Image (tube, helix red, strand yellow):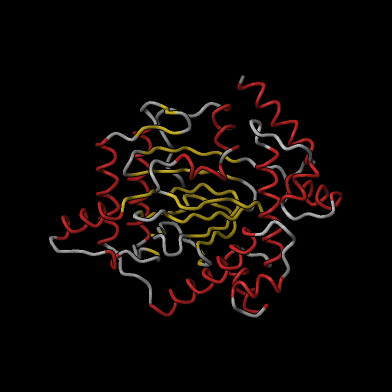
């Protein structure tokens, strides 16, 4: 059960703008809180995506909603750490291959970041400057603390304790929604920022992380997937399974197991959907429109235009030219 968000709400036009830029929201986060982020739609059909953001120079909260089966990833920027947790979902929801339960909260650093997968998801994330969070933890514990206490893993909180942390962060976001809307995000006053750091520090102090063996396997799967995805991002030509295996340094069986654990699909299926997602973002850019749909398909490694259109329609529920027309309507409405 998710706690209602009080305060101001975005208009449909604001939600449209937020959804249009959801794969590049890292560009809008204050400072360098996010090094890398994105979403890839796995389930077929038109998707509904909504987001709310509140941020300051030292902290950020992002609440997202999406209905289709989707995988998301985020890597905190250097000097930042992040909490993430699902508030509600249908079916299975995984974070770095681990099935989530109510009250679960994960903490991630720039070493790996996180990958989530789920359907009908409402999720929340919060970003913190590492040095400030360490200072807060030291103050609350009365002991000197260093970054080694912040590990990429789940906070081992009891379900009720985890849900309480989620509700407290939710209340901070609700408070921020009564502040001024600054473009695509709400401001975060100092009182909210201070409360957010205290909540995070208390949660970290209450944790006892999972065993090294289970943590190692999850990080290993994620590291393999990340190396494979990096090579797919670096080249725009069609990528083969052998390309991915060479990049990840593993055989195809191990690569397939890692993608199944993290994303729930095969490596090639994921790369195709990732590139279709990027093509959709390109078609939805009203301020720098592509010359043609063919140019977009070639840009993202689809050599067969007809197959590109068919795969695109199958995944998103509309043809590429329909997406392009929708983008043009958005531009006219903004003007």
Q: Find residue 117 and report its horizontal and vertical position in percent.
A: 57, 58
Which residue corresponds to the image point at 42% horizontal and 80% vertical from the top-left? 213
Q: Does 257 appear above or below 165?
A: below
Q: Find residue 247 and report its horizontal and vertical position in percent.
A: 61, 72
Image quadrant occupied by the C terminus: top right
Which residue corresponds to the image point at 50% horizontal and 74% vertical from the top-left? 220
Q: Is 205 or 300 nearer to us in this picture?
A: 300
Identify the image quadrant of residue 185.
Answer: top left
Q: Find residue 114 and report its horizontal and vertical position in percent.
A: 48, 60
In screen coordinates, is 320 left or right of 136? right
Q: Does 142 appear above or below 15?
A: below
Identify the image quadrant of residue 264.
Answer: bottom right
Q: Is 83 or 236 nearer to us in this picture?
A: 236
In screen coordinates, is 305 left or right of 199? right
In screen coordinates, is 2 left or right of 221? left
Considering every residue shown, the one lying at the far top of the view is 335
């Amino acid at each position: 059960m998710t706690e209602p968000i009080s305060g101001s709400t975005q208009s449909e036009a604001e939600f449209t703008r937020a959804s249009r830029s959801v794969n590049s929201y890292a560009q809008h986060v204050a400072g360098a809180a996010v090094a890398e982020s994105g979403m890839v739609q796995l389930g077929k059909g038109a998707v509904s995506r909504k987001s709310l953001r509140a941020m300051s120079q030292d902290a950020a909260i992002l609440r997202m909603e999406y209905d289709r089966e989707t995988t998301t990833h985020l890597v905190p920027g250097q000097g930042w750490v992040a909490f993430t947790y699902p508030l509600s979902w249908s079916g299975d929801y995984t974070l770095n291959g681990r099935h989530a339960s109510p009250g679960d909260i994960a903490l991630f650093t720039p070493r790996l970041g996180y990958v989530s997968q789920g359907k009908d998801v409402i999720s929340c994330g919060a970003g913190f400057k590492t040095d400030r969070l360490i200072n807060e933890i030291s103050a609350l514990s009365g002991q000197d603390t260093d970054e080694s206490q912040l590990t990429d893993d789940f906070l081992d909180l009891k379900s009720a304790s985890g849900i309480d942390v989620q509700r407290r962060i939710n209340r901070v976001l609700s408070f921020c929604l009564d502040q001024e809307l600054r473009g695509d995000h709400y401001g975060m006053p100092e009182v909210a920022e201070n409360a957010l750091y205290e909540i995070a520090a208390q949660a970290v102090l209450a944790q006892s992380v999972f065993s090294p063996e289970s943590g190692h396997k999850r990080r290993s799967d994620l590291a393999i997937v990340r190396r494979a995805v990096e090579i797919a991002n670096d080249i725009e030509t069609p990528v083969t399974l052998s390309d991915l295996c060479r990049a990840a340094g593993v055989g195809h069986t191990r690569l397939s197991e890692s993608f199944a654990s993290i994303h729930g699909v095969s490596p090639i299926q994921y790369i195709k959907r990732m590139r279709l997602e990027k093509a959709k973002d390109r078609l939805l850019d009203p301020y720098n429109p592509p010359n043609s749909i063919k140019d977009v398909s070639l840009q993202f490694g689809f050599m067969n235009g007809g197959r590109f259109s068919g795969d695109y329609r199958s995944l998103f529920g509309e043809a590429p030219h329909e997406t392009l027309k929708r983008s043009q309507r958005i531009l006219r409405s903004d003007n």
